[in-house]
Image (cartoon, helix red, strand yellow):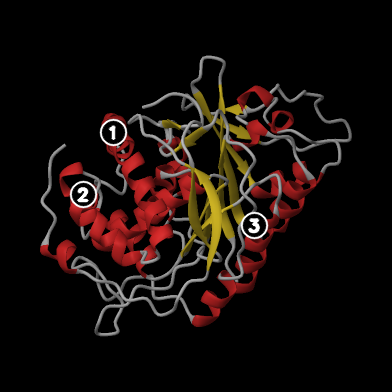
Amino acid sequence: MPTDLGSNVVKPSSHLTSAKPRWLRSLPLLLLPLAVVTSDGHAQVHIDKSATQAAMVSVAPMAMQQAVQATTGTVATPPSATATSPLSPVSQAWTEMLNKIVSDPPPPHLVRGTHYVISNEDRHDLWLPTVQNKGGAYIGVGTDQNYVLAGWQKPELLVLFDFDQVVVNVHYVYRVFFIHGNTPEEFKSLWEPKNEATALRLLSEAYPHPKQRAAIVDAYKMSRGSVLARFRKVVGIYKQHNIRWFLDDQSQYDYVAQLFRTGRVVMVRGDLTVGGSMSSIASAITAVGVKVNVLYLSNAERYFTYSEGFRKSLLALPYGDQGVVIRTRARPNGVYMYVVQEAKNFIDWVNHPKVNTVYQLTHNMDADPNPGLFYIRRTPTATVPNVPHPPFSHLKSN
């Protein structure tokens, strides 16, 4: 989320140039106005307010993608995948339940008038021991960091949630590249400008509706420079700390790719303050019988006080017994703190009638010996900390 920024050329394999996914059903579409954007090659991509409005097609409920089918009728899997993969194509019952997830209306403005197409949080590895092999469901906001965390958690359901449709469109791009890239190198190569023709062909085959395709292609062109720069930055950070992640660990990469190939990824535009989309996510996940073991909020709570929509929808999620909420909080110098909270503790705080801001939760955190990592362990009492929410209206763009 907001604040700061952050190759080898790999020739696409014959698999990348020949794969043609087949869809089992048509997708209903919903028109949505979206401002045309320009790319500055960085994390913060600002809206060009002088540009004319462009029509965009959002999917309703394009949140859920069915398993990709090969022409033989079998699920498309990479050569490196084995017959013992823990992920099988979702059932029709799952598909029906997850397709009941709905989008929230687009927000009237974005934070700083900006599309955050990459993360600017650099130490997600501090959460590795917390999320590793937790399974269950994962829900997260933002972009690339979700795939890093999913590679460690190995969830059976991945829910990608953001209030900016452009960010959701970037996930649509990720989806196609994960499906067609058999290795991390092939995946990364699809973001390279020299492979634009291949990337555009794959996006066109995946998203045949002209307006929908145009919006997703815009997101690809706008974000690819930032995405590649982000990958290079994370490689350097994680090498320094001896951390393996999905772009240097084939098994992690295969797992994330299989989430998409087997139809286990939901991508949806939602507003935490409204709660409609998140409530539908809670209902759908409850219906399929999966527990939410990781909820990643980044620093989204920085930009609002707790509304009734937020409370109701977040409390409705079916958390696992070992479920955790992970979030970041920026220090005055912009450096992030990485915060862990047990889901049961989070529920206690959100349920409290006098709690209306995340700053009451993070007022007195316990510091871990590992610098940058913190825990919320206190429980709310009858008298909760009276911590005012800092001003945030100046962060909004009309």
Name which residue type carries label 1: Ala
Report if residue 361 is visible in the image: yes
- In the rendered picture of this protein, how many numbered marks are placed on residues? 3
Label 1: few (<14), some (14–19) or many (≥20) C-alpha neighbours in 10 Å: some
Residue underneath mark 2: 196
In the figure, is residue 305 to the left or right of 6?
right
> Which element is circle 3 on?
helix
Which sits earlier in the primary sequence, circle 1 or circle 3? 1
Residue sitting at the far top: 333
Q: Is residue 150 visible?
A: no
Q: Looking at the image, which residue sits at the far bottom?
A: 72
Which numbered dot is residue 208? none
Q: Nearer the viewer, residue 295 or 178?
A: 178
User: Where is residue 273 drawn, in percent x and y?
Assistant: 70, 44
Q: CA distance from mark 1 to mark 3?
A: 32 Å
Is residue 208 depicted above or below 217 in this figure? Answer: below
Label 2 vs label 1, nearer the camera:
2
In terms of depth relative to the viewer, which is nearer, 327 or 170?
170
Q: Classify mark 2: residues with Cα within 10 Å, few (<14), some (14-19) or many (20+).
A: some
Q: Earlier in the sequence, mark 2 or mark 3?
A: 2
Quickly name the residue at label 1.
229
Q: Quarter holding the C terminus?
A: top right
Disc 3 designates what residue?
277
Residue 22 placement: quadrant: bottom left
| Residue at position x 13%, y 39% in the image | 8
Q: Earlier in the sequence, mark 2 or mark 1?
A: 2
Q: CB under 8 Å between callouts 2 and 3?
A: no
Q: Residue at x 24, y 54 (%)?
A: 199
Looking at the rendered structure, the secondary structure element under dot 1 is helix
Label 2 sits on what residue type? Glu
Say what secondary structure mark 2 lies in. helix
**Residue positioned most to the right:** 382
